[in-house]
Image (tube, grey):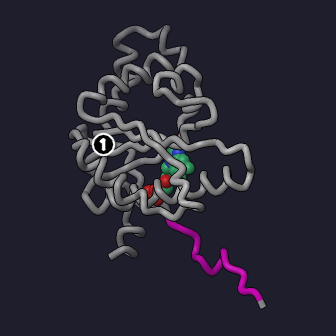
């Protein structure tokens, strides 16, 4: 039931290292792309790292992201980046940055709807996700490694993976406190 999936989906931050099949990631994106989007602009594209792409993306993150890592020993670096190995796949969601403010906002909003679709569809398949926005997502070196063009932006790093423990939900505010009934 949709309501149950929406309520029970959790952001998974501890994966168990099991690989996620590229075909599962592709199937999720295929359905997620039915998100509403104005003018049918479909304002998204994806860079997917799964299977053999996992090692490659991990190395790219090491090289492109946090300069102070260059000063660590191999052992320290291994410890620090071990977590990157654990998601079973990565999806980078790339959106256009339209020069018109309204269209840019619409495109951003549509891509957010797609991301939530993807999280729910993955959850239904027993695959956990976490939507991440690390500080280095806009780093020029990282953008270049992913071949992100001027006029595009990496909106999200979506991690996919299997998990052994379900995190506890952070309670939501009762919706009545968020609603003003007009009139
Ligand atoms: C736009 C956006 C950015 C996020 N960025 C991060 C992030 O950088 N790191 C992280 O650990 N979680 C990130 N999250 C996940 C949230 O922390 C998570 O959704 C929140 O804790 C609620 O947990 P739940 O999804 O299990 O309900 C992000 C979520 C959203 C919607």
Q: Position of residue 59 (x, y in %)?
A: 37, 20
- Left or right of residue 149: residue 130: left
Q: Position of residue 135 (x, y in %)?
A: 58, 32
**Which residue sits at x=28%, y=53%?**
27
**Which residue sits at x=36%, y=31%?**
84
| Magenta extent | 171-182
Report the front residue among 133 and 172: 133
Q: Quadrant of residue 47?
A: top left
Q: Quadrant of residue 106?
A: bottom right
Report the front residue among 63 and 92: 92
- Left or right of residue 72: residue 160: left
**Which residue sits at x=44%, y=24%?**
61
Asked if one can make out residue 145 in the rendered structure from this viewpoint, the answer is yes
- Asked if residue 64 is positioned above or below residue 161 in the image, the reply reads above
Q: Position of residue 12 (x, y in %)?
A: 37, 49
Q: Which residue, given by chain and number where applicable, does mark 1 sit on?
A: 15
Q: Quadrant of the C terminus?
A: bottom right
Q: Is residue 173 magenta?
A: yes
- Left or right of residue 71: residue 12: left
Q: Position of residue 169 (x, y in %)?
A: 43, 61
Asked if one can make out residue 163 in the rendered structure from this viewpoint, the answer is no
Report the front residue among 38 and 79: 38
Q: Residue furthest right?
A: 183
Q: Quadrant of the N terminus?
A: bottom left
Q: Is residue 40 magenta?
A: no
Does mark 1's beta carbon lie closer than 8 Å to ligand 1? no
Most frequent secondary structure within the magenta stretch: loop
**Which residue sits at x=43%, y=44%?**
158
């Amino acid at each position: 039931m949709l309501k149950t999936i929406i309520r029970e989906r959790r952001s998974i931050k501890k994966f168990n290292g099991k690989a996620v099949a590229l075909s599962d990631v592709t199937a999720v994106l295929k359905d997620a792309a039915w998100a509403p989007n104005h003018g049918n602009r479909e304002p998204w594209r994806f860079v997917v790292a799964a299977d053999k792409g996992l090692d490659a993306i991990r190395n790219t993150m090491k090289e492109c992201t946090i300069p102070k890592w260059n000063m660590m020993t191999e052992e320290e670096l291994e410890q620090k980046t071990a977590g990157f190995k654990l998601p079973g796949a990565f999806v980078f969601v790339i959106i256009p940055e339209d020069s018109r403010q309204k269209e840019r906002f619409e495109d951003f909003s549509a891509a957010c709807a797609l991301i939530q679709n993807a999280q729910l569809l993955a959850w239904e398949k027993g695959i956990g996700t976490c939507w991440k926005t690390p500080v280095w997502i806009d780093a020029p070196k990282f953008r270049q490694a992913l071949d992100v063009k001027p006029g595009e932006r990496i909106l999200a790093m979506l991690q996919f993976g299997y998990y052994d423990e379900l995190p506890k939900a952070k309670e939501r505010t009762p919706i009545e406190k968020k609603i003003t009934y007009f009139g």
